[in-house]
Image (cartoon, grey):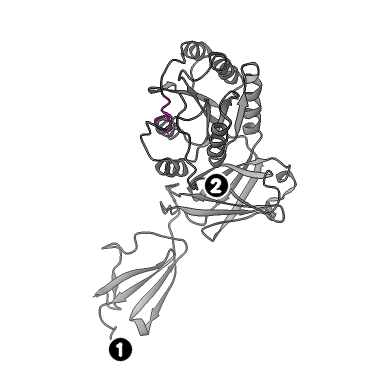
Amino acid sequence: MVKALWRAAPVFFLVAMLIGGSVSAVSVEQAQVCMPDIDVYLYDGGDVLSGIAEGEITAALDGAALSVRSLVRAEQGIFYVYMIDVSASMPAGHFSAAKQAVLEAWGRLRDQDTLALITFGNTVDLRLEGGESRAKVTETLDSLKNTDTSTKFYDAMDVLIDTVLQTEDMRRVAVVISDGIDDTDAGMTQEALEEKLIRTGVSISAMCIDTAPESGVAQFGDFIRLSGGELYIFEPADAGTVLDSLLDRLEGGWHLALQAPTNVASGEEALLNIDFGDAQSITLPVVPERWIPDSKQPRVESVVYAEGENAFLVTFSEAVTGVEADGVWMLADGNGEPVAMASVDVIDGVSCRLTMAAPPPEG
């Protein structure tokens, strides 16, 4: 039963702030960060991207320039997680039509796609993990009953996040089918959920029944669009057609591949800015937490003695971490004798200062 939907508090996760151009033109579905790679999946509602060359695009992460590797139609596999509301507030006709629509969606999966299923009501259950046969999918959907008395959407989001984190190298898309969101039994705050979604890089789209209250539909839609998805309204007669439209939008997206100059993952929220030239620009928050191990060793580019500081200024070929840790450095004089250091200080990602305990002997 629908009780309280999303509060009208300011939210900021995966928000694409559009500047210039049409607001409905280019928008972000999701951004996945595994430093130095940043993969951004885009919707193009105005046929903008097909006319833009890669050389016209610029991007930056917290002001640091990123290189543009490619802009192509998205062909990467999609990990779909369908989330079906099994509360009694879902009308029988809508519920039955939704189950049939999900079964038909399983039938249109591409070879690179996977489908999982979560139900949420009094409890949250992972019914399908992906890779099951059509017979198993049919059996599972047929067994679902809309008889529960609550809608534990927040808890379902926890299960969603745990589920999608098991996947690698796939787009992560959730499709919620519900009459709204009951948050009276919330196991986490809205802010905590927003933070988790930023870190996970999952897009959420939804189908809402056409008999839901107008105010509830509006609030439900606000949340879905903030997560990078879209809200679709359906009735029993057109559930399959509506879900097809949703999937067409997802499968028709674009993939923008960006690369940072370093694989250092800060673990802190950063602003990703993408400028499509005269067409449009987009800014959204991301959290670089994962990284690809770098097999190429950094080089020392220069060592300069700063006499006034009694220190050596060391510059590397790329950003490094851990230079201030004990035992990393050993200074020696011309005779090979150790020289005591007073401190090691990081100047920025690519340089540091080695301050000696005493001035070097003259001569």
Q: Amino acid at mark 2?
A: Val
Label 2, on which residue?
Answer: 15
Q: Is 217 rendered above or below residue 236? A: below
Q: Secondary structure at mark 2?
A: loop
Q: How many marks?
A: 2
Quarter of the image that includes the N terminus: top left
Label 1, on which residue?
Answer: 362
Identify the mark at residue 222; answer none if there is no mark: none
Q: Is 261 rendered above or below residue 30? A: below
Query: Which of marks 1 and 2 precedes in the sequence?
Result: 2
Quadrant assignment, res 314: bottom left
The magenta segment is: 150-157
Q: Nearer the viewer, residue 186 or 143?
A: 186
**Residue 147: % across, % down:** 44, 15
Q: Is 283 rendered above or below residue 340? A: above
Judged left or right of residue 158, residue 284 is: right
Per the model, the C-alpha gap separating discs 2 and 1 is 60 Å
- Write the residue at 42% across / 29% down: 156
Q: Residues within 10 Å of mark 1 (few under 14, many from 20)?
A: few
Q: Residues within 10 Å of mark 2 (few under 14, many from 20)?
A: many
**Residue 310: % across, % down:** 33, 81
Q: Amino acid at mark 1?
A: Glu
Judged left or right of residue 330, residue 123 is: right
**Residue 160: % across, % down:** 44, 31
Q: Secondary structure at mark 1?
A: loop
